[in-house]
Image: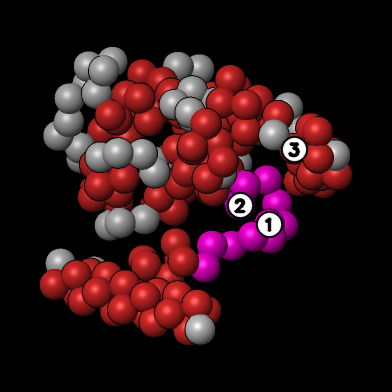
Protein backbone atom coordinates (compact mmCIF):
# COMPACT_ATOMS: atom_id res chain seq x y z
CA UNK A 1 0.00 0.00 0.00
CA UNK A 2 2.77 2.46 0.98
CA UNK A 3 4.64 1.72 -2.29
CA UNK A 4 1.55 2.53 -4.38
CA UNK A 5 1.18 5.80 -2.52
CA UNK A 6 4.86 6.68 -3.18
CA UNK A 7 4.47 5.86 -6.88
CA UNK A 8 1.39 8.07 -7.13
CA UNK A 9 3.15 10.99 -5.38
CA UNK A 10 6.18 10.56 -7.66
CA UNK A 11 3.95 10.52 -10.78
CA UNK A 12 2.06 13.65 -9.73
CA UNK A 13 5.31 15.47 -8.93
CA UNK A 14 6.89 14.44 -12.22
CA UNK A 15 3.83 15.60 -14.18
CA UNK A 16 3.88 18.93 -12.32
CA UNK A 17 7.56 19.50 -13.10
CA UNK A 18 7.12 18.60 -16.78
CA UNK A 19 4.28 21.13 -17.05
CA UNK A 20 6.41 23.86 -15.42
CA UNK A 21 9.31 23.11 -17.77
CA UNK A 22 7.03 23.34 -20.81
CA UNK A 23 5.65 26.68 -19.54
CA UNK A 24 9.22 27.98 -19.51
CA UNK A 25 9.94 26.61 -22.97
CA UNK A 26 12.27 23.93 -21.66
CA UNK A 27 12.50 20.36 -22.85
CA UNK A 28 11.51 17.65 -20.38
CA UNK A 29 14.85 15.92 -21.07
CA UNK A 30 16.31 18.32 -18.51
CA UNK A 31 14.16 16.72 -15.81
CA UNK A 32 14.98 13.17 -16.86
CA UNK A 33 18.72 13.83 -16.71
CA UNK A 34 18.26 14.63 -13.02
CA UNK A 35 15.83 11.80 -12.30
CA UNK A 36 17.96 9.21 -14.08
CA UNK A 37 21.57 10.38 -13.80
CA UNK A 38 24.34 8.56 -15.59
CA UNK A 39 26.01 6.27 -13.09
CA UNK A 40 28.63 4.58 -15.25
CA UNK A 41 31.47 6.51 -16.81
CA UNK A 42 34.01 5.47 -19.38
CA UNK A 43 36.60 8.19 -19.27
CA UNK A 44 37.94 11.10 -17.26
CA UNK A 45 36.24 13.61 -19.57
CA UNK A 46 32.81 12.29 -18.53
CA UNK A 47 33.82 12.45 -14.88
CA UNK A 48 34.98 16.07 -15.30
CA UNK A 49 31.70 17.03 -16.98
CA UNK A 50 29.77 15.42 -14.09
CA UNK A 51 31.97 17.25 -11.59
CA UNK A 52 31.17 20.56 -13.32
CA UNK A 53 27.46 19.78 -13.34
CA UNK A 54 27.60 19.14 -9.61
CA UNK A 55 29.63 22.32 -9.12
CA UNK A 56 26.87 24.37 -10.74
CA UNK A 57 24.15 22.60 -8.78
CA UNK A 58 24.00 25.01 -5.87
CA UNK A 59 21.50 27.68 -5.00
CA UNK A 60 21.07 30.17 -7.87
CA UNK A 61 24.24 29.10 -9.63
CA UNK A 62 22.63 26.56 -11.96
CA UNK A 63 20.40 29.16 -13.64
CA UNK A 64 23.14 31.79 -13.80
CA UNK A 65 25.69 29.42 -15.31
CA UNK A 66 23.48 27.46 -17.70
CA UNK A 67 21.42 30.36 -19.08
CA UNK A 68 24.04 31.52 -21.60
CA UNK A 69 24.92 27.87 -22.28
CA UNK A 70 21.44 26.95 -23.54
CA UNK A 71 20.79 25.06 -20.31
CA UNK A 72 23.75 22.72 -20.78
CA UNK A 73 27.05 22.61 -18.89
CA UNK A 74 28.12 20.38 -21.78
CA UNK A 75 28.35 23.52 -23.95
CA UNK A 76 31.47 24.53 -22.00
CA UNK A 77 33.32 21.98 -24.15
CA UNK A 78 34.28 24.85 -26.47
CA UNK A 79 36.35 26.46 -23.74
CA UNK A 80 37.38 23.34 -21.83
CA UNK A 81 38.85 21.30 -24.68
CA UNK A 82 36.03 18.77 -24.70
CA UNK A 83 36.57 18.39 -20.92
CA UNK A 84 40.17 17.26 -21.14
CA UNK A 85 41.53 18.17 -17.69
CA UNK A 86 45.15 18.04 -18.85
CA UNK A 87 44.55 20.51 -21.70
CA UNK A 88 42.49 22.76 -19.40
CA UNK A 89 45.41 22.94 -16.97
CA UNK A 90 47.90 23.49 -19.78
CA UNK A 91 46.01 26.59 -20.96
CA UNK A 92 44.56 27.99 -17.73
CA UNK A 93 46.60 28.78 -14.65
CA UNK A 94 44.04 31.03 -12.93
CA UNK A 95 40.26 31.33 -12.70
CA UNK A 96 40.61 34.82 -14.19
CA UNK A 97 41.98 33.37 -17.44
CA UNK A 98 39.09 30.90 -17.66
CA UNK A 99 36.62 33.69 -16.97
CA UNK A 100 38.24 35.85 -19.66
CA UNK A 101 37.64 33.16 -22.29
CA UNK A 102 34.13 32.42 -21.03
CA UNK A 103 33.20 36.10 -21.32
CA UNK A 104 34.69 36.33 -24.82
CA UNK A 105 33.32 33.07 -26.25
CA UNK A 106 29.83 33.20 -24.72
CA UNK A 107 29.57 37.01 -24.86
CA UNK A 108 28.74 37.11 -21.16
CA UNK A 109 27.61 40.36 -19.58
CA UNK A 110 28.47 39.47 -16.01
CA UNK A 111 29.90 40.67 -12.74
CA UNK A 112 33.65 39.98 -12.88
CA UNK A 113 34.03 40.46 -9.13
CA UNK A 114 35.60 37.58 -7.21
CA UNK A 115 32.34 37.20 -5.27
CA UNK A 116 30.38 36.78 -8.51
CA UNK A 117 28.95 33.37 -9.37
CA UNK A 118 30.86 33.10 -12.65
CA UNK A 119 34.17 33.76 -10.92
CA UNK A 120 33.31 31.22 -8.23
CA UNK A 121 32.39 28.71 -10.90
CA UNK A 122 35.67 29.36 -12.70
CA UNK A 123 37.50 28.39 -9.50
CA UNK A 124 35.51 25.13 -9.47
CA UNK A 125 36.45 24.51 -13.10
CA UNK A 126 40.14 24.95 -12.32
CA UNK A 127 40.27 23.11 -8.99
CA UNK A 128 38.19 20.26 -10.43
CA UNK A 129 40.68 19.89 -13.28
CA UNK A 130 43.58 19.97 -10.81
CA UNK A 131 41.96 17.27 -8.69
CA UNK A 132 41.23 14.98 -11.63
CA UNK A 133 44.68 15.53 -13.15
CA UNK A 134 46.11 13.55 -10.23
CA UNK A 135 44.83 10.45 -12.01
CA UNK A 136 46.58 9.06 -15.07
CA UNK A 137 43.32 7.97 -16.67
CA UNK A 138 39.78 6.90 -15.91
CA UNK A 139 40.84 3.48 -14.60
CA UNK A 140 43.14 5.15 -12.06
CA UNK A 141 40.28 7.40 -10.89
CA UNK A 142 37.86 4.47 -10.80
CA UNK A 143 40.26 2.46 -8.62
CA UNK A 144 40.54 5.43 -6.27
CA UNK A 145 36.76 5.68 -5.87
CA UNK A 146 36.37 1.92 -5.50
CA UNK A 147 38.84 1.96 -2.62
CA UNK A 148 36.39 4.11 -0.65
CA UNK A 149 33.38 2.13 -1.81
CA UNK A 150 34.84 -1.21 -0.67
CA UNK A 151 35.35 -0.12 2.92
CA UNK A 152 32.30 1.10 4.86
CA UNK A 153 34.58 2.97 7.25
CA UNK A 154 36.24 4.87 4.40
CA UNK A 155 33.11 5.46 2.29
CA UNK A 156 32.08 8.58 4.23
CA UNK A 157 35.54 10.07 3.82
CA UNK A 158 35.34 10.48 0.03
CA UNK A 159 32.85 13.39 0.07
CA UNK A 160 34.92 15.06 2.80
CA UNK A 161 38.03 14.73 0.65
CA UNK A 162 36.24 16.12 -2.41
CA UNK A 163 34.97 19.04 -0.32
CA UNK A 164 38.56 19.92 0.54
CA UNK A 165 40.00 19.38 -2.92
CA UNK A 166 37.41 21.07 -5.13
CA UNK A 167 36.75 24.76 -4.64
CA UNK A 168 33.04 25.48 -4.32
CA UNK A 169 32.14 21.98 -3.19
CA UNK A 170 30.54 21.65 0.18
CA UNK A 171 29.46 18.33 1.55
CA UNK A 172 26.16 18.33 -0.39
CA UNK A 173 27.80 18.99 -3.77
CA UNK A 174 30.53 16.43 -3.04
CA UNK A 175 27.80 13.86 -2.36
CA UNK A 176 25.93 14.98 -5.51
CA UNK A 177 29.07 14.36 -7.54
The residue to which callout 2 is attached is 46
Dot 3: element: helix
Cα–Cα span, label 1 and label 3: 19 Å
Residue drawn at x 61%, y 52% is 46
Determine the image quadrant of residue 107: top left
CA distance separating discs 2 and 1: 6 Å
Whether residue 93 is situated above or below residue 50 in the rendered picture: above
In the depicted structure, whether residue 70 falls above or below residue 142: below
Q: Left or right: 59 with respect to 170?
A: left
Would residue 106 appear left or right of 109 to someone viewing this image?
right
Q: Nearer the viewer, residue 40 or 20?
A: 20
In front: label 1 or label 3: 3
Q: Is residue 6 visible?
A: yes
- At numbered mark 2, what does the secondary structure look like: helix, strand or loop? helix
Residue holding disc 3: 155
- Residue 83: tell me if it is visible: no
Q: Which residues are magenta?
A: 36-47
Amino acid sequence: MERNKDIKIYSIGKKFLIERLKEKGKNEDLLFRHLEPKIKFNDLKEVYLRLLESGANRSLMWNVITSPLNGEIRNLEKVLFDFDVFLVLKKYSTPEKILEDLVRIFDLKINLDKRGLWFQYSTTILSGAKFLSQFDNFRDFDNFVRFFHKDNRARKALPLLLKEEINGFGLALACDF
